[in-house]
Amino acid sequence: MTKSRIDVRIKESKEDMIPYILTEKSLTVVIDGKAQTMNHDHPSWGVAKQALKDSDWEKLEKQFDVASAVEDYFDSAAGVEVKDGGVFYQGESVHNYCVDKILEFMRQGLPYEPLVKFFGKLMQNPSSRATNELYRFLEHKNMPLTPEGNFLAYKGVNNDFTDFYSRKFDNSVGQTLSMVRNGVCDDANIGCSNGFHAGSYEYAKGYASNGGNLMVVEIDPADVVSVPHDCDCQKLRTAMYKVVGHYEHIDAPPMEDGLNEDYIDWDGNDAYAEGYAQAKQDMLDNLNN
């Protein structure tokens, strides 16, 4: 009986208004006698303000509790579990930028399942640097994730869909290209080196600026080897990708007027003509002597 009365009192207390003060840049509440402040750049800012507007005090309180602000979730195929406000891969707690984004998406009520699948594949990547930096790179260059947890990038190729460098790799839609991973350069300080390259729209279009095709490729995050520092960090090297779309054809730029002005019109060069005639006459004279 005593336990039942306590439960009722707790429930009733949560229905009571939480003391608060709201400004343009922060929200401060008092929960269990302790003041807690949320700044306007907090992932739960919008949700907290709506809960305040709706007088949903229980929901408002949860926005200040990380463990309560995200729901438990388990993706067995990806090996990823979200519980107690943390993200675990194969039972081990992980902390990196991608994990922060998963929790942020969950707090804001955004679709987080593709990101969880992406994270599961990313954790299979043997490169520590790629694991820690790839999602930030994709976010910076606006490369979207697929529902399966892969991501899309762009690649510039020749008019016949072969690669620019070797002209032996067919990049027609539907083709999957791969190479041995340890044959791909993993040094981000080296710009042009071994490996399949793909990147942002600006990078790929610039690569095909003299004419060719701009393709959309799908890449498993586990296959990414490095993100070179050159080209304003707009490209990456991978051991495998699949061509999933033809984005656009790029025509070769037209020849500019006056392009040949620096060349001499030999047919109209009198000095050359006179020299040629004299040399010819000298040869004939030598033959006759």
Image: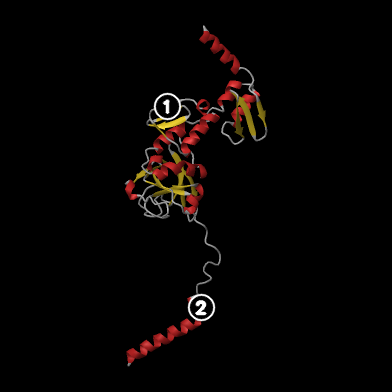
Name which residue lies at 58% across and 13% down: 9
Above-or-below relation of 100 to 14 = below
> How would you rate the neighbour count of disc 1 (Cα within 10 Å): few for under 14, some for 14-19, many for 20 or more?
some
Nearer the observer, 196 or 222: 222
Q: Which mark is residue 268?
A: 2
> Would you identify the image quadrant in which residue 117 lies?
top left
> Would you identify the image quadrant in which residue 189 lies?
bottom left
Name which residue lies at 48% across and 33% down: 102
Above-or-below relation of 219 to 48 = below
Residue tagged 1? 74
Nearest to viewer (mark 1 / mark 2): 1
Nearer the observer, 188 or 281: 188
Location of the C terminus (image quadrant): bottom left
> How would you rate the neighbour count of disc 2 (Cα within 10 Å): few for under 14, some for 14-19, many for 20 or more?
few
Q: Position of residue 103 (x, y in %)?
A: 50, 32
Q: Position of residue 112 (x, y in %)?
A: 49, 31
In the rendered view, does 27 fall on the left or right side of 286?
Answer: right
Amino acid type shown at disc 2: Gly
Secondary structure under tag 2 reads: helix
In the rendered view, does 70 fall on the left or right side of 125?
Answer: right
Q: Is residue 220 visible?
A: no
Q: Position of residue 259 (x, y in %)?
A: 53, 66
Q: Position of residue 24 (x, y in %)?
A: 67, 34
Secondary structure under tag 1 reads: strand
Q: Is residue 168 visible?
A: yes
Name which residue lies at 34% across and 45% down: 178
